[in-house]
Structure formats: structure tokens, C-alpha cells
Image (cartoon, rainbow, N blue to C red):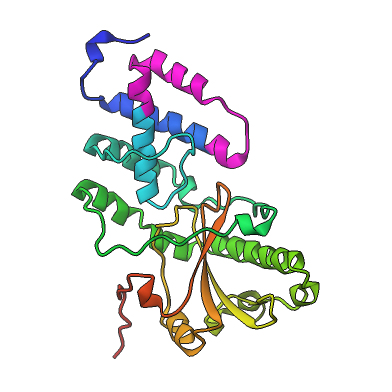
Amino acid sequence: MVDDTKTGTDWQTDELDAIVVNYFVMLDAELSGRTYNKSRHSEALRERIGRTHGSVEYKHQNISAVLNKLGLPWIPGYKPQSNYQKALIDALDRYLSRDEAILVAVPASPPVASPTSQVFVDAPTLIPSHEDIPEHLCRLVRKFDCVERDHRNRRLGKAGEAFVMEFERRRLTECNRPDLAQRIRWVSEQDGDGAGFDVLSYGQNGLRQLIEVKTTNGSAETPFYLSRNEIEVAGEYPTEWSIYRVHLFANGPRVFTVRPPLDRSLHLRPETWRASF
């Protein structure tokens, strides 16, 4: 039941904590492939906190917007709306600090869509400058650094590479090149990480493709690390080397490619230094 005295008022801490928990219950069902009913969840929440349907729906979309900035999956039915209220940021901080499972979630390797052409999408457009975001959101992004998190999440990285291996086999088979599909190698798994790429595949014409796989549960715009070795190999083999940026991995993977010269498609800046004596 709607509490008319709350109309037009700021959400309180207990209400924000309740809607954040409600959102993550639905997100867990979404990522696990379990059936759930958003309307029923919303109705139960409204009965508890006395907010209107529109207010609850919009707050769910605000949560999606913050999760998108954190490089995390969000519920597709709640398209991000970027109203980054500090109180909501604080509620998400409290939740993620208590339960970090979503930060390192690695779904079972999802099936490759058929045909494989549906998996490829256009790369994001390189923009001159990044969107200005409030400092309280910047602090949250730094605390739950998606770039470092994805980089250290070896299970996610390996799952993404396994996905690309299967994807490439399917792609070449669909192109009537099963002979090439049989020659694909998981280089990083078989030979280690020093090659500067993860998967050796082939184009339909039989030419080599050196694929560096970068995987995230976040959106296409989620940033990622590149090593010095990867950048050097990209420069040495500019016609063969490419990045497969696997994104939305938990929701239904999509892939875009980035080819050298990398500075035409990516903002590249050093963020770490090697210290020695």
C-alpha cells in the first residue's frame, strides 16, 4: 500500500537497503537461469516500504546504472538510468562489502548463439573525454575496481577463453572449414601466458588469427588491462593480432574486436610502474 506521506520525499536508509537486497535477489535468479517475476518482487517491496510503482521502478534502474559503472551485470528489464544519489551509492557499498559473491561470479560457460554471427557486435565509439560522474560514485568505482577485479579473476578469464575456443570452432565449421577448426589452439592454456595472445585461430582464408581474450560480466564500455607484452605483440603482428572483448558474459555473451593500431580504438594510459633497485 502506498504511503502518501512519502510522495516526493527522499528515500530513507532502510528503504534503500531493502530495494538493493530485492534487486540482488532478482539478479541472482537472472544469472542462474531461474524463473522469477519482477512484478511480484516489486509489489512485495512496495507493500513493505510504501513507495509508488514508478518510484520503485526508477530506483531499480538507478541501481542498474551504478552496477554498469562497476562493470557488473544488471537486470536487462531495468535499463540503467543515471541518477547517482549518494544515499543509494552508500546502500550499494554496504551490500557489496557484506556479500562480494557477485563481484567474482563466474557462470557456467554459456552456449554459443547460432549462428555465431549473432555474437559479434560493433565496438563502442571512442569518445574524446569520459562522462563526468560524482565523486561519491568515483570512490565506489575505485573501491570495487572492475579492471583489477576482472584481471585477477582467473576463473572468469579461463571461462572466457574456453568460450572463444568453442566459438571459433563453431565459426569455422559454419564457414565450411572444419579442417581449420581442428587446428585451433588454446595457447595460454597449453603453453602459458607469455605469448601475448590466448587463442591461435584462423580466418576463413586460412590466415592465422592471434586472439587476445578479455572477458567481463560488465558492458561493452567496461575498461580492461593490456600488458606491455600484449601491446608489443600487437605491434609486431598488426594484421594477425586482435582483441576479442567478451562482455555481458553472465547475461549472454557478445564480442567485439579491436585491431592495431590500438590507439585508434582505445584510450591507453599507464597505471602501474615496475619498481627495482
In the displayed structure image, the side of residue 275 where residue 214 appears, left or right: right
Image location of residue 50, percent across then percent down? 34, 14
Find out whether residue 56 is within the magenta segment. Answer: yes
Magenta residues?
A: 28-57
Determine the residue positioned at 58% across, 49% down.
Answer: 252
Determine the residue positioned at 23% across, 10% down.
Answer: 5
Q: Nearer the viewer, residue 148 or 61?
A: 61
Image location of residue 54, percent across then percent down? 35, 22
Determine the residue positioned at 60% across, 56% down.
Answer: 119
Vertical relation: 216 (above or below) 54: below
Q: Nearer the viewer, residue 67 or 276?
A: 67
Residue 24 in sight in this render:
yes
Q: Quadrant of the N terminus?
A: top left
Vertical relation: 274 (above or below) 118: below
Residue 97 in sight in this render:
no
In the displayed structure image, the side of residue 153 where residue 10 appears, left or right: left
Determine the residue positioned at 58% across, 62% down.
Answer: 160
Q: Quadrant of the C terminus?
A: bottom left
